[in-house]
Each structure stands twice: as structure tokens, then as C-alpha cells.
Amino acid sequence: MTRPLPCDAFPRRIETGRLYLRPPEEGEAALYARHAQEAYATQPEPISDDEARAFAAFMLGHWERYGFGFFVIDIADGFGQRISIGHAGFKYVDAWPNHWPQSYNAIELGYSVVPSARGRGYVTEAARAVLTAAFAALDVPSIRAKCRHDNPKSAAVLLRCGMTELEATEGTRRFEIARPATVQIAGPFKDSGDRDEDFGF
């Protein structure tokens, strides 16, 4: 793919049975940076303040440049107010904080939620919803994903979403899901009881 995907194709809101997914907002950059640090705090290599801010800028910039990216995941608290718990969505494979892609050959699923929101199926619910939305909106033959070898819970999420594991590289497990023959618009998510999810990107 020599050109980016159409900027106006991806939905600006996705709702599931429990989640509200929306694009990031400029005024919430500090929140996204804090979420990134909280998520990485449970990983072998925590990230610095500068790296967290760079990721928040990346979330915002990918949407601004390409019209899709990582959604903010909101849930309703006990008082009916929405609170943000993490992100789920896509980036070009060749894009990462402080680096924009030179090619647009594939997109990659990524996600994470803060530790206090884990173990409730939110990541699986969000990942399934954004995958369905991506295949409905974007003309892509497949979607990729990856996780560390020491993160089996994230790998379990990807497998539950229908991904197939590919040949691994040193330190990284790689996955891919092909475009389904029939694509449906994402709707309410039926809780399957899956609870063993963890940090993914």
C-alpha cells in the first residue's frame, strides 16, 4: 500500500455492551500519558515521563494525520459518569512514538488498560469491537498484532479475537487475522466470561 487509508472512513465512536470508545482529545494528553505509565508499571521495563508523554502525543497525532488510531476506552462508574481506563485501536505497523511511517502496508492492533481495570474482560471486548469496525470501514486484507513472550494474557486476548499466531521473533509473539468473508458492523458485546486479559501494547 503506497498511500494511507482514507482519512474519513473510520468511525468516530464505537459502543459495546459496557464500553464507550472515542478518539483521544488534545486536552486529555496528560491522562493518556498517566495511563501509559500505569500500564507499563506492571511490565519488566517501565517507561519514563518523557516516553509516556511521547505516547500520548502519538495517540493524538496518528488520528490527526490518518483519521484512525487508538480509541480511548471509557466505562460508566457507579454514578453513571464515564471514566477512562485505557486505549484500544490501531496504528500503521511502521509507526511508533516519534516516528511516522514511510509505508502503509499494514495496520496493527494495540491496547492496554490500567491495572485496576484488568481481569474484567474489557480488553477482549474492546479489541473485538475495534477489529469488527476496522474490517467494516477499511479495505485491508488482514490486521496484525504482537505481544511480548512474557505476556501470555495478552496473547490469550488475541487468540480469543480470532487471530492466528505466526512465527515468533526474539522477544515478540506475532499474530494476524485475515479479513472475514462477511463483515458485520460492531454491535453490543455478549460477555463470554473471559477474564484473563492483560497489557497488550
Image (tube, rainbow, N blue to C red):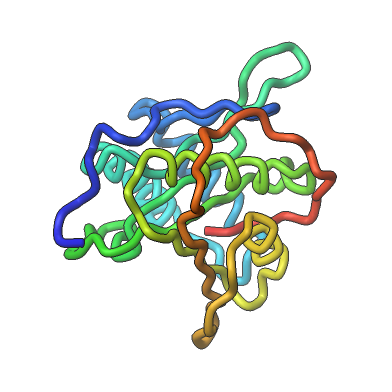
Q: Along the line of sight, which residue is nearer the eye, 146 or 72?
A: 146
Judge from the rendering whether residue 196 lies leftward or rightward of residue 64; answer left or right.
right
Q: Where is residue 175 in the image (x, y as percent from the top left)?
A: 53, 70
Q: Which residue is drawn at 58% across and 47% down?
A: 127
Q: Along the line of sight, which residue is nearer the eye, 105 or 70?
A: 105
Task: Give the number of callouts.
Answer: 0
- Give the image quarter of residue 105: bottom left
- From this viewpoint, is residue 41 visible? no
The residue lying furthest to the top in this view is 79
Q: Residue at x 68, y 21 (%)?
A: 76
- Give the image quarter of residue 121: top right
Q: Residue at x 34, y 63 (%)?
A: 93
- Is residue 113 depicted above or below 12 in this figure? below
The residue lying furthest to the front in this view is 181
Q: Where is residue 123 in the image (x, y as percent from the top left)?
A: 65, 46
Name the image quarter holding the N terminus: bottom left
The residue lying furthest to the right in this view is 193
The residue lying furthest to the bottom in this view is 170
Judge from the rendering whether residue 184 lies leftward or rightward of residue 6; answer left or right.
right
Q: Where is residue 131 in the image (x, y as percent from the top left)?
A: 51, 47
Q: Along the line of sight, which residue is nearer the eye, 42 or 171?
A: 171
- From this viewpoint, is residue 77 visible? yes
Q: Where is residue 72 in the image (x, y as percent from the top left)?
A: 50, 35
